[in-house]
Image: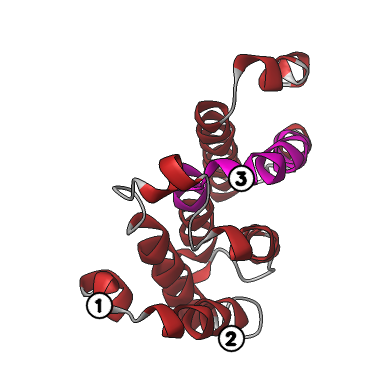
Amino acid sequence: RICDLHVRSIPEETFPTLVNGLAGKLLNETPRVSSQACFGIHNLAAAFSNDNTAETAGTNALTTYMPQLLQTLLLVVDRSDASESNLRICAFEAISVLIQNSAPDVKHVLLQLLPAIIDRLAQSFNMPVLTNEDKEQKEGVQGLLCGLIQVIATKTTKEDIMQHCDLI
């Protein structure tokens, strides 16, 4: 709740402990707890939406944690129980907000992430569809992956994206 309602009140020296604590809950906890951790990361990242420091300094407090958080959240998406407690959706939304509020100095991380997202999108077309629920899940995942590609595209340049366009 603190990450939701009072994120600006979090002392700077507490930030690393908080981020690492939330990241530690993503993979080994129940879907409900992991979903709440995703929500906490989402809110922490959203707090940087009006932070002009990233544009002037080229970095922000998220930069140090960005590669680890993105990698861990992608592992959350692949959890066998990710469909419970909206965990998959919460993880994708956390990734999206992290990317949206990333500083310019993590552009290289985003460009490394893009091929992985494109590959996941391509793989999603091979997901078996046996029931309407399977179809809805497949289409939901594809929509979330397309959303991530769009967010990455807004944080990078046309030249950065051009080499990947044929694969999208």
List the residue tagged with mark 2.
29
Q: Is residue 119 left or right of residue 72?
A: right
Residue of label 3:
105
Image quarter for residue 82? bottom right
- Please name the residue shown 25% across and 77% down the image: 9
- Over which residues does the magenta segment extend? 96-121
Residue appearing at x 42%, y 59% in the figure: 45
Vertical relation: 25 (above or below) 166: below
155 relative to 64, above or below: above
Considering every residue shown, the one lying at the far front of the view is 57
5 left or right of 167 in image: left
Q: Secondary structure at mark 1?
A: helix
Figure check: 94 above or below 16: above
Q: Which residue is mark 1?
A: 9
Q: Position of residue 77 (x, y in %)?
A: 63, 59
Please say whether residue 135 is visible from this viewpoint.
Answer: no
| Residue 108 is covered by the magenta coloring | yes
C-beta proximity under 8 Å, tags 2 and 3: no
Q: Secondary structure at mark 3?
A: helix
Mark 3 or mark 1: whose residue is earlier in sequence: 1
Q: Amino acid at mark 1?
A: Ser
Between 126 and 142, the one lying in front of the other is 142
Amino acid bearing label 3? Asp
Marks 2 and 3, the one that precedes in the sequence: 2
**Residue 76 % position (x, y):** 64, 66
Q: In the image shown, does 47 or 95 lie closer to the viewer?
A: 47
Mark 2 residue type:
Glu
